[in-house]
Amino acid sequence: MKIGRASSTDVEKYANAVVEYEKRIARFTPSIEKMQSLSSFQHKRISDLKQDASRIRWNEFLQKVYPHGNIKDLTIITVQFLEYFKEVSHIVTTSDNVGLSDYLVWRYIFANLPDVAMKIGRASSTGVEKYANTVVEYEKRIAKLTPAIEKMQSPSSFQNKRISDLKQDASRI
């Protein structure tokens, strides 16, 4: 069966590749307790992120997430779970599948580089206050997501859910 320009076999292979990627990343996913900790947040320059993962196009991705921001190498952003970031970066940068790697970077940015509730730019005292407020809001969102995250950390339910979701999405193409 053909789905768009791809056969169902192609779609299934891609879905399985996504699931395998997600399973590799799930091994490094921080616990719920760590997700709710303020100590998991750090300020980093984009140039520092580039040193940790040089093959990831940080400026390009962040400019798309924050289209009104002035993204430069000296731009300071908030990073959550730096060690997790390094593990994800390693997985992404060692992949031959560029599209899948870009997808994972995009997901990582949305999940772990929280919006600091200010225009991206240099940190200021106002920015720090807004950052503190954003962390509180982020923690509230995490608390609401806790049941879903716990379910995702269960390998069998996670794998079955992701494969079925991907197949369902692919069938709509």
Image: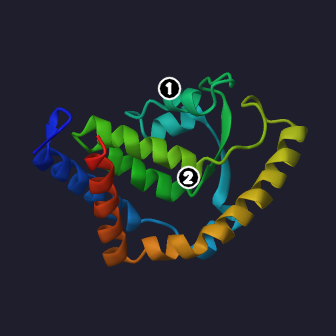
Label 1 vs label 2: CA separation? 17 Å
Determine the image quadrant of residue 163. Answer: bottom left
Quadrant where the image shows the N terminus: top left
Between discs 1 and 2, the one toward the N terminus: 1
The disc label shown at residue 173, or none: none
Rendered location of residue 50, percent (x, y): 48, 34
Is 66 in front, or is 165? 165
Left of 1 or right of it: where is 71?
Answer: right
For badge 1, the amino acid type reads Glu
Residue depicted at x 41% and y 55%: 87
Whether residue 79 is situated above or below residue 51 in the rendered picture? below
Q: Secondary structure at mark 2?
A: helix
Whether residue 37 is situated above or below residue 170 in the rendered picture? below
Q: Residues within 10 Å of mark 1 (few under 14, many from 20)?
A: few
Quadrant where the image shows the C terminus: top left
The disc label shown at residue 111, or none: 2
Rendered location of residue 114, percent (x, y): 65, 48
For badge 2, the amino acid type reads Ala
Rendered location of residue 115, percent (x, y): 69, 44
Residue depicted at x 53% and y 27%: 59
Count of labels in the image: 2
Is 118 in front, or is 47? 118
Q: Residues within 10 Å of mark 2 (few under 14, many from 20)?
A: few
- According to the image, label 1 marks what residue? 60
